[in-house]
Image (cartoon, rainbow, N blue to C red):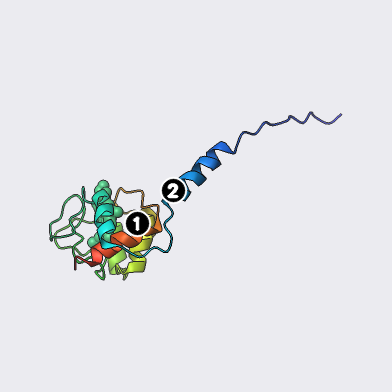
Amino acid sequence: MPSSIKSRRCSFGLPIGLILVGWAAVQEPAHAADVEKGRRVFQTCASCHQATSETNGFGPYLKGVVGRRAGSAAGFNYSQAMRDAGTGGLIWDEKALAEFLSSPKKKVPGTSMRFFGLWFQSEIDDVIAYLKSNP
Ligand code: HEC
């Protein structure tokens, strides 16, 4: 006789159901980037970043960051990884920012920014719109 085949019991369904409910709740139809919403999203960044003045905190100031070279805020002590990204030509255009904000460590491996990333494209679009409104 072949070795016995153990039957496995599966209990899935509930976790997936919860994820779908959560996902459905945050979906917004036809999203247009919104500076006001972006200002609110930016509160999750504000413990480390200033967007309205050229003042460094735990993170570099983000005033004028859209279009700026990575690692170039005057007076901020960046990680080697961020400095290398800048000298390698990384410019914070909207596409690069969106990639960084969805996963900082994927876009700039070795970055010292301790932030998991934003989950929703709408939040990313809004916070970039807010950053753009602070040139
Ligand atoms: C816990 C602190 C912290 C939080 C929260 C945080 N950041 Fe950062 N951020 C940093 C640090 C530190 C750096 C510098 C990283 C490096 O040198 O590798 C950085 C770098 C950056 C850069 C690159 C800037 C440059 O001059 O090259 C951008 C853009 C940025 N953060 C955006 C954001 C946004 C937008 C949020 C909110 C969604 C956010 N960060 C949340 C700490 C933080």
Query: Which residue position is annotated with label 2?
Result: 25
Quarter where residue 39 is shown: bottom left
Q: Quadrant of ligand 1?
A: bottom left
Q: Residue at x 46, y 45 (%)?
A: 22
Asked which secondary structure carries label 2, the reply is helix
Q: Would residue 18 be visible to someone looking at this image?
A: yes
Q: Does label 2 or label 1 sit earlier along the sequence?
A: 2
* Residue that extends furthest to the front in the rendered view of this protein: 29
Q: Is residue 108 above or below residue 132?
A: above
Image side of residue 83 versus residue 52, left or right:
right
Q: Is mark 1 within 8 Å of ligand 1?
A: yes
The amino acid marked with disc number 2 is Ala
Quadrant of image for the C terminus: bottom left
Asked which secondary structure carries label 1, the reply is helix
The residue closer to the viewer here, 35 or 131, is: 35
Image side of residue 65 versus residue 24, left or right:
left
Quadrant of image for the N terminus: top right
The amino acid marked with disc number 1 is Glu
